[in-house]
């Protein structure tokens, strides 16, 4: 009896297990599913941009000095030409007076130099005329009369030579005939030689007188040449023959240099009043009354409101997908609700620049300027941060699923679909994909149901599915 009961319990237990196994096998598996419908799929990325004014100018002082007065405060609206502040110009006014005095002094020196040079020119011209007179006098007295007298002496010496020669010839003939002695003949020869010597001396005296006359001519010619050269030099310096003379150019250069310095100081004095370059709003006001202003230090910035652009720096690997004129999405975060509006890429910088990321990494980024389209809800001010969404690829009317539903299957991609209430493995062909979704080109049709979790426990081919 006891043995029969044991078998009965054993058989009942096995039957119960079998019934439970059949129950759980036939029981539908609860699975979260999604329905696939045509949609727009896009590939995009986001960067943070900064709002800047399209027209903005940071104003630096042209002149160095103490700030005499500040007429505006941060946030003031100004009109073009309004005086914003004034810099003290006492030192510049004193400098201007000194330069103008130097100019007057140089002009006085120039006139004095010209007067002295003109006086010297008159003196040299008179000296030239005097040399002409001296030359005439030199050629008339005493040299001319002395030459004539000497020429008379030479003629007389020549006459005496002829007489001496005749006398010598006669005495020599008589000596040969024995009519006169040797002594008498020698006396005649001696007399002839003396007459020859006298003629030679007289000719030498005449030559000396002529040399003195010719030397006088050379002397006066040299004096005239030197005087004419000095006259020509003075005329050139006075600008009578050329406006490029050294004297003219010297004083002209000095005066032009002083004029340039005077104009520069006048310009600085005029710019000591800092004026608004256009209608706008004052910001970044650094100037304070009594503080020094330096040309390299900004005083304030004026920007034009209601005319903004967004500057964003994009990684070089992403910039290749962007083009000028491309539409973008601008997002302004709000506590209540984000404001989303459109913009257009206006400019892309021609080169990259080095930026440091929030993680401290060095990155190469390219500046992109975006022109926002009007949106009444968006409140823009210089310095505000906006998120910029760039859509690089976009496909409409596509079937797409979350990337997480895919799994590898027989060297292909596949997913679980529910057909006729059962789980079926469906191989697919992928297309465009972004960070969350992937387009399915083949394997799905409009309205298909896809199981969201391909790793769901109990999920297998043909398993009945209870939709959640």
Image (cartoon, rainbow, N blue to C red):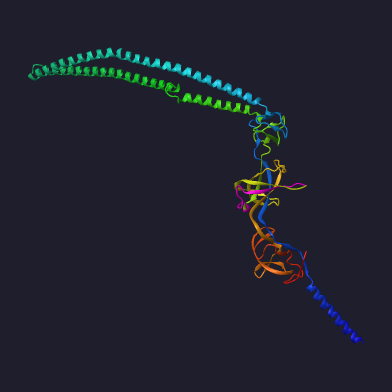
Asked whether 34 falls inside the magenta stretch, the response is no
Extreme residue in the left direction: 177
Foreground residue among 98 and 144: 98
Left or right side of 406 for 166: left
Is residue 218 positioned above or below 373 on the image? above
Is residue 67 positioned above or below 323 on the image? above
Extreme residue in the right direction: 1
Q: Is residue 166 visible?
A: yes
Place of residue 159 in the rendered image (x, y in percent of width and height, measured from the top left): 17, 14
Q: Can residue 299 be seen in this view?
A: no
Instruction: Give the magenta part as a residue range.
Output: 317-335
Place of residue 335 in the rendered image (x, y in percent of width and height, measured from the top left): 77, 47
Q: How many marks?
A: 0
Place of residue 388 in the rendered image (x, y in percent of width and height, measured from the top left): 68, 49
Q: Residue at x 15, y 16 (%)?
A: 162
Q: In which quarter of the image is the C terminus?
A: bottom right
Place of residue 395 in the rendered image (x, y in percent of width and height, measured from the top left): 64, 56
Foreground residue among 48 and 459: 459
The picture quadrant where one finds residue 310 is top right
Is residue 306 positioned above or below 316 on the image? above
């Amino acid at each position: 009896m006891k043995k029969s009961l044991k078998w009965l319990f054993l058989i009942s237990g096995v039957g119960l297990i079998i019934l439970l196994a059949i129950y759980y096998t036939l029981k539908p598996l609860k699975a979260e599913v999604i329905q696939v419908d045509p949609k727009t799929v896009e590939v995009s990325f986001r960067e943070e941009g900064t709002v800047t004014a399209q027209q903005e100018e940071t104003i630096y002082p042209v002149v160095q000095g103490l700030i005499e007065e500040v007429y505006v405060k941060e946030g003031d609206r100004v009109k073009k030409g309004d005086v914003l502040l004034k810099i003290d110009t006492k030192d510049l006014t004193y400098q201007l007076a000194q330069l103008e005095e130097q100019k007057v002094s140089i002009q006085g020196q120039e006139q004095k130099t010209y007067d002295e040079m003109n006086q010297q020119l008159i003196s040299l011209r008179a000296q030239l005329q005097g040399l002409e007179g001296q030359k005439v006098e030199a050629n008339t007295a005493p040299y001319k009369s002395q030459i004539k007298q000497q020429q008379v002496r030479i003629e007389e010496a020549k006459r005496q030579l002829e007489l001496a020669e005749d006398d010598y010839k006669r005495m020599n003939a008589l000596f040969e005939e024995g009519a006169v002695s040797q002594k008498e003949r020698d006396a005649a020869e001696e007399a002839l030689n003396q007459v020859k010597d006298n003629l030679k001396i007289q000719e030498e005296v005449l030559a000396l007188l002529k040399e003195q006359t010719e030397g006088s001519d050379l002397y006066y010619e040299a004096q005239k040449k030197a005087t004419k050269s000095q006259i020509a030099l003075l005329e050139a310096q006075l600008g009578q023959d050329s406006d490029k003379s050294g004297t003219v150019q010297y004083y002209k250069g000095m005066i032009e240099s002083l004029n340039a310095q005077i104009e520069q100081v006048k310009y600085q004095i005029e710019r000591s009043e800092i004026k608004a370059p256009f209608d706008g709003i004052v910001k970044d006001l650094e100037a304070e009354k009594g503080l020094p202003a330096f040309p390299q230090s900004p005083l304030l910035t004026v920007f034009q409101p209601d005319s903004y652009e967004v500057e964003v720096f994009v990684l070089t690997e992403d910039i290749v997908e962007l083009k000028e004129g491309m539409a973008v999405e601008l997002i302004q975060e709000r506590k209540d609700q984000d404001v989303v509006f459109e913009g257009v890429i206006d400019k892309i910088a021609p080169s990259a620049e080095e930026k440091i990321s929030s993680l401290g990494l060095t990155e190469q980024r390219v500046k992109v300027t975006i022109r926002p389209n009007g949106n009444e809800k968006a409140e823009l001010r210089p310095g505000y941060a906006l998120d910029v969404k760039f859509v690089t690829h976009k496909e409409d009317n596509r079937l797409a699923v979350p990337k997480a539903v895919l799994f590898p299957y027989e060297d292909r991609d596949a997913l679980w679909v529910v057909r006729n209430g059962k789980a079926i493995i469906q191989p697919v062909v992928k297309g465009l994909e972004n960070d969350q979704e992937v387009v399915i080109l083949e394997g799905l049709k409009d309205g298909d149901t896809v199981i969201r979790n391909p790793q769901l426990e109990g999920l297998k081919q043909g398993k009945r599915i209870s939709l959640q």
